[in-house]
Image (cartoon, rainbow, N blue to C red):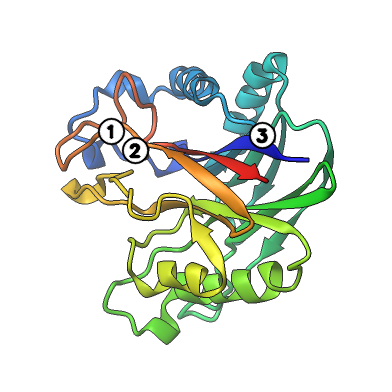
């Protein structure tokens, strides 16, 4: 039996990472945590997604979103990064048959010998006769001049695809998040080379304008057995204020309707 659902990916901007001088076009009052939590809940509800994958989620924000989203039928799970980082990945859903979740912590090693602490939160759902696995992640930024083999985000990508996704090809997969890379770069190409489809292929638009440069660095990938209808994000340029009254994060959410025939 055919089914479809809407999946969203959204970096919500952890309060711990906010430095007002980094956002000179954003009024200071918009950074007040309670105000932003309320605004994030409203923005998430506006997406009308069945599964919402969030990055840079701190525990107080997760608790506030749980309280706000639960009356609308959502349940949530959170997995925090390690190595003392304050944030992690969360998945909220209103899918009837949630079949468990786990956090996969990457084993990539930093220059000082520590592991990064980054993770992929994998949540399982039963969709009729199909098993759907959704991986939400925030891949680590690294210098663009870093050799591909040593690039921190590429190491995490290789592990995510090899150890997590390709270890269970009996499931249908959605892999999404903030990849800190752009369409066409080796890190992004690795997902299509591993057999996944880009929900926004040929339709990418900027999702962030950090450092005064609008760029597409957020993605939704999926098994090729699924078809995707992506929703175009709001238009931004290098100077668009983010966060703003309308957008409570420095990223825009992505939304796609996925269908299994």
Q: Element at badge 3?
A: strand
Residue identified by numbered label 3: 92
Asked which quadrant contains residue 104, the reply is: bottom right
> Relative to residue 233, is residue 109 drawn left or right?
right
Circles 1 and 2: CB atoms closer than 8 Å: yes
| Relative to 53, residue 35 above or below | above
Labelled disc at residue 242:
1
Of marks 1 and 3, the one in the foreground = 3
Q: Residues under labels 1 and 2: Cα distance?
A: 5 Å
Residue identified by numbered label 2: 250
Circles 1 and 3: CB atoms closer than 8 Å: no
Labelled disc at residue 157:
none
Of marks 2 and 3, the one in the foreground = 3
Instruction: Point out the tag, 1 or 2, that comes first from the N-terminus.
Output: 1
Q: Element at badge 1?
A: loop
Residue at image position (76%, 59%) is: 171
| Relative to 48, residue 239 above or below | below
| Relative to 144, residue 28 above or below | above
Residue at image position (51%, 60%) is: 197
Q: Residues under labels 1 and 3: Cα distance?
A: 24 Å
Instruction: Point out the tag, 2 or 3, that comes first from the N-terminus.
Output: 3
> Relative to residue 32, is residue 132 drawn left or right?
right
Percent position of residue 58, x then y:
57, 39
Instruction: Point out the tag, 1 or 3, that comes first from the N-terminus.
Output: 3
**Which residue is most to the top?**
71
The one of 41 and 107 positioned closer to us in this rendering:
41
Percent position of residue 153, x then y:
46, 69
The one of 240 and 38 positioned closer to us in this rendering:
240
Dot 3 surroundings within 10 Å: few (below 14), some, or many (20 or more)?
many
Please say whether residue 176 is visible from this viewpoint: yes
């Amino acid at each position: 039996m055919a089914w479809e659902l809407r999946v969203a990916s959204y970096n919500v901007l952890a309060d711990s990472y906010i430095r007002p001088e980094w956002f000179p076009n954003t009024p200071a009052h918009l950074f007040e945590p309670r105000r932003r939590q309320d605004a994030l809940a409203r923005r998430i509800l506006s997406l009308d997604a069945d599964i919402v994958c969030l990055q840079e989620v701190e525990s107080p924000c997760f608790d506030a979103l749980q309280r706000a989203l639960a009356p609308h039928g959502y349940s949530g799970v959170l997995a925090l990064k390690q190595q003392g980082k304050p944030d992690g990945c969360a998945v909220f859903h209103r899918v009837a048959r949630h079949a468990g979740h786990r956090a996969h912590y990457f084993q990539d090693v930093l220059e000082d010998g520590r592991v990064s602490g980054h993770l992929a939160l994998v949540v399982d759902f039963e969709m009729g006769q199909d098993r759907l696995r959704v991986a939400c992640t925030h891949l680590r930024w690294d210098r663009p001049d870093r050799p591909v083999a040593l690039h921190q985000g590429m190491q995490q990508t290789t592990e995510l695809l090899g150890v997590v996704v390709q270890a269970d090809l009996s499931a249908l997969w959605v892999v999404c998040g903030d990849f800190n890379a752009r369409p066409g770069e080796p890190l992004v190409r690795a997902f299509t080379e591993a057999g996944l489809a880009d929900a926004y292929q040929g339709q990418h638009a900027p999702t962030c304008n950090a450092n005064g440069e609008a760029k597409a660095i957020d993605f939704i990938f999926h098994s090729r057995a699924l078809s995707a209808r992506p929703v175009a994000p709001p238009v931004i340029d290098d100077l668009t204020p983010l966060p703003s009254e309308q957008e409570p994060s420095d990223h825009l959410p992505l939304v796609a309707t996925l269908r299994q025939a």
